[in-house]
Every structure is written in C-alpha cells, then in structure tokens.
Image: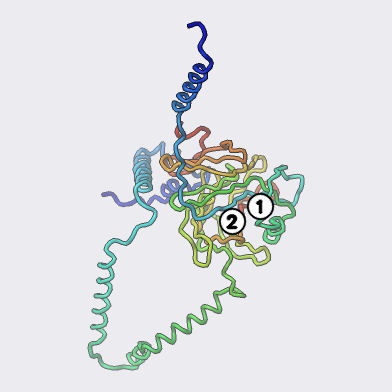
C-alpha cells in the first residue's frame, strides 16, 4: 500500500481550498505531470468512495479492549511507583504533589478560576458560538467574538481576495428545497414554487450548479 | 343503432374518464428527511455609498428585528442591502445548502442538538469553487451569525445565518 500523499497542494485541490488562480495553475501542473495526475485521480476516487460508504459518525471499535489496555498500563505504572526508592527532597516534593487531597484542591481551584475567567459577563450562554474556524486560503485570518450590542456572533474573515468591482453579484430568494439523497442533489424553489436551480457535487466533491433536473 | 340512448352515453363517458385517470402516472409519495430545525441565510452588501446599491428589494424576516441596525453595530457601514435570501431545513443525515446567491453560499452539516437549545453545525462558506472558511458552531435562535466576507466595490459582502424558533 502506498503511503498517503504529502503533496499539500494536491490535498488543497481535492478539498476545494484553492483560489481560482491556484486551481488553474495546479490543473496545468496536472496536465504536465502524468504521475501527479494519476495520484490525483486515485485520491479523488478514494475520497469519493469514502464519502459514499462511510457514515458521518462511527463508534470506536472494541472500546473495551482499549479501556482494558489503558487500565493495565496504569496498573503497571502504579506498581513501578510503589517500589521502594531512596528518599530525597525532590521525592518528598513529588510525594506532596501526589497527595489525593492536593489534586482535588487543585482541580477545584482551576475550576473556580476557569469559571470566572471564561464565562462571559452575566453568565449568558444563550447566544450562538463559534467553536472553531479554519480558513485555508493563504493570508486569510479569522477572528470570532460575540457582539452584545448587536446580539450576534461574528466570524470575521480578513485577507480574502476582493471581488472585482465590475463583477455582478446577484442574489436569489429561495423559499423551499427538495433533496434527493440518491443523486445527492438539492433543488431550490422560489415563493411561487418554480425551480430556481439545482445544486449537487462534482467528482471532486465540489459544489456544482445544474440547470436541469438531475434525474434528467 | 343510429342514436345511443343518453344514459348509455353518460356511462361510456364516465368509464373513459375513469380509465384515463387510472392510466395517468401517479406522483411518488414524498419522504421528508428528518430535520434539526430551519435556518434563514442571506447575502448582504454593506456600503457607505448609496449609489453603489444594486436595488434588490429583499426583506429580512421579522424574527431578526431591525437587522440593519444590528449589522451596523458590527460593520462600519451606513447601508445594508439584502441581495438574496434562503430559508432552509437543516437535515439530520444529509448536508444542507444555503444559497442566497450563486456567488457566495454555505454548506451546513448538522452535528445534532446543542445543550441549552440550538443546534451544533459544521459550516463551510463557499465562493464558487473555493471554500473560504470551515467552522464548527452552535447556532441558537434569536442569535444570528454574521460572517464578514470579501470586499466588493467600496463595501463588503456579509453572510447572515439565523436559526428560526420552532
């Protein structure tokens, strides 16, 4: 079995994380390098196959086995610790830190400090939260915060490539959608019930807008 | 037989009509996938120059209150124009797309209900074929998410996502 690819550009290409310019350059690279093109095709097939066959969440297989291994390892470490050793100042200090009451007191102190440091003023956690964010574009930075005055959670993206001023950005008004899992496509409808467009994914897993019904 | 009796004609007509009805293709029963709630997503153009506005006439839903004022507290612009909007179910087992515009849109995967209400989501903001940001979030009703997107003209594109109350 071949090792997983270490070509970061290939992975970014597969994940749709390249800008249009980067993608065009990489597509040219693929045309010029048959070995790279072959690897890209293999990874794309593997990615599509995994997406199709693997459920979104999986239970840990043989969890009991892992638990028992961990417990065994802890027992071995405890036995090693229990062997008599010559006492020293360092050992005495370590022994102090191993006192059960000290561990409990430490945990309680950290919990109390964490409560006062992390819980926002007023203790209101009923607003939306950003748990994590990742912007794959080069030079793009994200920042998140809750704006109390607007009562909104903000995810700010800085360093994005600007949309050209002469580019027409137009919106649509979608009132309902129908999803067809078998063909992985969603049809969007307007207020009058007329189809606006169909969104699906291409072989690389990137969004694809279709004009016609995916069932033909 | 030169003329059929009227009763026979009516009977014949009814039979033909019934046969045509039975022969017509019946629509398949629609099976609605399980959902975690419903979101409203919009693409907003923020600018200080009223002349730059596109003239779109979209309105924000009432549950968001004065959206312009709320946006104005976060983004330093005078005008906020809704270019497009999309009301979408969040499917429990399938990805959902929130597409107020083909230029900037959102893929949403549910990670299940959140403690203290709301829903846990994995979000991806796409600009055509490029993903701009991936994020794990908890979305709660009444507390919208404002995503500050790319600059356009003299302003900025903003994506708003809000969970509707059940």
Q: In this image, B1 relative to A175: left or right?
A: left
**Which labelled disc corresponds to residue B164?**
2
Say which element carries label 1: loop
Q: Earlier in the sequence, mark 2 or mark 1?
A: 1
Q: Give the quadrant of residue A146.
A: bottom right
Say which element carries label 2: loop
Image location of residue A139, percent across then percent down: 55, 55
Query: Dot 2 falls on which chain?
Result: B
- What residue is rendered at 36% in x and 89% in y? A99
Image location of residue A214, percent across then percent down: 46, 35
Q: Nearer the viewer, residue A90 or A70?
A: A70
Q: Nearer the viewer, residue B152 or A176?
A: A176
Determine whether label 2 and label 1 are within 8 Å by CB: yes
Image location of residue A211, percent across then percent down: 53, 33
User: Mark 2 to mark 1: distance in Å?
Assistant: 10 Å
- What residue is rendered at 32% in x and 90% in y? A91
Q: Give the quadrant of residue A197.
A: top right
Residue underneath mark 1: B61
Q: How is the image coloured?
A: rainbow
**Which labelled disc corresponds to residue A184?**
none
- What residue is rendered at 55% in x and 64% in y? A129
Work out which residue is located at the far top of the displayed protein and give it: B2
Mark 1, other Cα within 10 Å: few <14 / some 14–19 / many ≥20: few
């Amino acid at each position: 079995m071949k090792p997983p690819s270490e070509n970061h550009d290939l992975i970014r290409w597969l994940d749709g994380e390249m800008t249009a310019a980067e993608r065009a350059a990489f597509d040219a690279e693929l045309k010029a390098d048959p070995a790279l093109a072959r690897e890209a095709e293999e990874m794309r097939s593997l990615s599509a196959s995994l997406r199709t066959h693997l459920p979104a969440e999986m239970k840990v297989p043989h969890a009991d086995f892992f638990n028992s291994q961990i417990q065994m390892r802890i027992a071995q470490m405890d036995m090693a610790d229990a062997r008599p050793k010559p006492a020293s100042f360092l050992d005495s200090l370590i022994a102090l830190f191993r006192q059960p009451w000290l561990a409990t007191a430490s945990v309680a102190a950290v919990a109390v400090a964490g409560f006062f440091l992390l819980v926002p003023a007023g203790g209101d956690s009923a607003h939306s939260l950003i748990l994590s964010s990742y912007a794959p574009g080069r030079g793009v930075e994200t920042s998140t915060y809750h704006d109390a005055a607007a009562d909104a959670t903000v995810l700010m993206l800085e360093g994005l490539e600007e949309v050209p001023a002469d580019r027409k950005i137009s919106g649509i008004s979608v009132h309902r959608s129908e999803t067809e899992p078998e063909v992985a496509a969603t049809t969007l409808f307007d207020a009058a019930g007329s189809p606006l467009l169909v969104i699906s994914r291409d072989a690389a897993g990137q969004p694809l807008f279709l004009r016609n019904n995916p069932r033909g | 037989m030169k003329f059929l009796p009227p009763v026979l004609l009516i009977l014949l007509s009814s039979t033909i009509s019934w046969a045509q009805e039975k022969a017509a293709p019946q629509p398949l029963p629609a099976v609605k996938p399980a959902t975690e709630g419903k979101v409203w997503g919009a693409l907003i153009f923020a600018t200080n120059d009223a002349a730059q506005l596109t003239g779109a006439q979209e309105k924000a839903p009432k549950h968001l209150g004065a959206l312009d004022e709320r946006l104005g507290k976060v983004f330093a612009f005078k005008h906020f124009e809704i270019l497009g909007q999309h009301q979408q179910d969040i499917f429990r087992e399938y990805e959902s797309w929130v597409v107020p515009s083909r230029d900037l849109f959102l893929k949403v995967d549910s990670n299940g209900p959140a403690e203290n209400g709301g829903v846990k989501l994995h979000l991806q903001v796409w600009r055509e074929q490029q993903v701009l940001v991936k994020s794990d979030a908890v979305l709660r009703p009444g507390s919208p998410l404002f995503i500050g997107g790319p600059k356009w003209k003299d302003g900025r594109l903003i994506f708003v996502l809000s969970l509707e109350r059940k």
